[in-house]
Image (spheres, coloured by chain):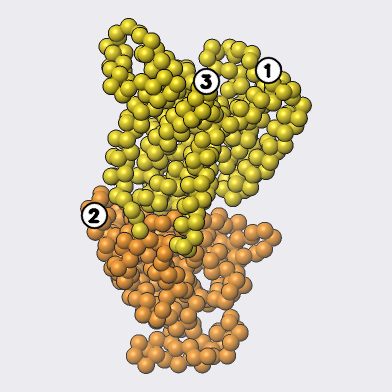
Amino acid sequence: MSIVADNISLHLAGFDLLRNINISVEAGQVTVLVGPNGAGKSSLLKVLTGELNPTQGAVWLNHRELSNWEIQDKANVLAVLPQHSELNFPFTANEVVALGCIPHATGYAVDQKIIADALQMVDASYLERRLYTQMSGGEKQRVQLARVLAQIWSPNALGEQFLVLDEPTAAFDLAHQQMTLEIVKQFSKRGVGVLMVVHDLNLAARCADNLVVMNGGVIEAFGSPDKILTEQLVEKVFEVKATISRHPTANTPLVIT
Amino acid sequence: MRYLAAAKLVWFLALLLPGVAIVSLSVGTVSIPWSQIIQTLLASIVGIEATQTSSIVLDIRLPRILLALLVGAVLAVLGAVMQGLFRNPLADPSLIGVSGGASVGASLVIVLVGGTVASPLAGLSLISFGAFIGGVISTLVVYRVATSGIGTSVTTMLLAGIAIGAIAGAFNSLLSYFSDNQMLRQISVWQMGNLGGANWLKVSIMLAVAAVLVAVLPGQAKSLNALLLGESEARHLGVDVQKIKQKLIFLTALGVGVSVALAGLIGFVGLIIPHMVRLLIGPDHRWLLPATALAGASLLMIADSIARIVVLPAELPTGILTALLGAPFFIGLLIRQRGEF
């Protein structure tokens, strides 16, 4: 099972945001999208999650065209964390994560257990009763992460589940970046397909089964970080001279600039 | 932090409501003791014939108080709905253009046909029809402006609502400019909002509207909660955002349109009550909606009671009281909130 982009192009307001994109996000794997600002990463996520309709091509979710999914069914297999979530109302962390339980709504007791576990997983149990509007940026982002985790916390009969994260680590300190990697790996082990945008190439190399390198609306390279992350590619795409070494313990590619 | 548990507040307000109603029934030009009010109400249920007291209570005060209760509840709950839909705690049910359009409709009727002409339906003035039609038309215009192939933009609705409000204000001034003294007085009294003309027909119409809201709104509470996260977030949580917008905008146009048609412009209830309740119990619409409805009902009954007794033997238009009570309170809230951001 997978999310498949079949020859997608997206034109918006006179701009070619995406051109002839073909990728497949497999269940049980971590796919990481990298690329410079304006490469089309967020646009691609929006098309893959049904937020924008492609001008050309089609998106398939578990072998069914995305536009043919009932919106409620889709919410039970696809959880999406946007880059910015503006929530100006004073929900507590517990209530925000509870919103993630809306699609499956298994009952109060089960939902509360999921909420507590999800908050614990993102190291935010202490925020449970605190107001979202009074949290720091990193705390807010962790609570939002817990919300999308709660949305696909348990497997669903409708098919393999997918977790789509747009720069989930942007506001995180080092410890919480590591935590996010662990969470992502844990979910992918359970069979969830993860697709995320990350800016830190080393972070991407540490957790990606597949790396998608985008530039100017097209896919520049696709494959395991080991194979595709080369000095030439980094210089071509990011316009930065870099040396590729190996991570001393994880033995993943290490990009040194 | 939250000051109260949600369920407690809802129960408290539900118990408060009959108390406020009985006090409201007892005050006025003639003061009637509570015991007699309860006696009269019980007697009317079993069908004992009317005394002078009972006719004051049942024919004059009761419809007015029930109208205040229903209008207060509808305006407050729709205020909460609009604030949720617009994700803006300062939104107001009049934001979508209903009130502006309604006052133009009312003024037009007053100037063109004269406010005293009887309508085809006894008990309802032509002004009410004019106001309702004006309110519905302006909401439609605002909605059409903000709706494109990709859906309805709430930001555009907000701006279009402001524009329509400005146009309506200009039309109102124009109509006032060309009206004679009597018309002018009628227009301005109507705009102040008044529950004085209450009768059982108005109460029944308002009750029907309230019944529709009670039937539909509780089912939307969870979706409104999800909407507070943002529209795309709500869609990813399985909420059909466009459908909900249409439904809620339609209900608001209906509820506010009818309220304004029957009771004139009554400000601040729809803005302040949801805000206040949210401060007490938080933004969860499953509790916010019933609590705002109950609080709005009580507040408008209280405001109307004060309006009836503050300048005896005359009475004040209710809208003056809601603004006079509500606005300073709101300013207080804003000053207190400054510290929290």
Q: Which chain is yellow?
A: B
Q: Position of residue A256 (x, y in %)?
A: 49, 91
List the single residue furthest toward the front.
Answer: B312
Residue located 36% across and 13% down the image: B54
Residue plotted at (45% across, 50% down): B227
In the image, residue A121 above or below residue B12? below
Residue B81's mark? Answer: none
Instruction: Indicate which label's residue lies in the foreground, 2 or 3.
Output: 3
The relative height of residue A212 versus residue B105 in the rendered view (above or below) is: below
* Residue A194 vs residue B132, the one in the foreground: B132
Q: Badge 1 sits on which subunit? A: B
Q: Which residue is pictured at 53% across the width and 90% down the height?
A: A257
Foreground residue among B290 and B250: B290
Q: Are marks 2 and 1 in contact (CB under 8 Å)?
A: no
Q: Amino acid at mark 1?
A: Gly
Secondary structure of the residue carrying tag 1 is: loop
SS at circle 2:
helix
Q: Secondary structure at mark 3?
A: loop
- Between A74 and B39, the one lying in front of the other is B39
Residue position marked by numbered label 3 in the rendering: B197
Q: Viewer-nearest of labels 2 and 1?
A: 1
Residue shown at 28% from the left, 13% from the top? B43
- Is residue A2 among what the camera can see? no
Q: Which residue is mark 2?
A: A110
The amino acid sitting under disc 3 is: Gly
The residue at the far top in this view is: B49
Image quarter where the N terminus of chain B lies is bottom left
Residues marked 1 and 3 touching at CB (< 8 Å): no
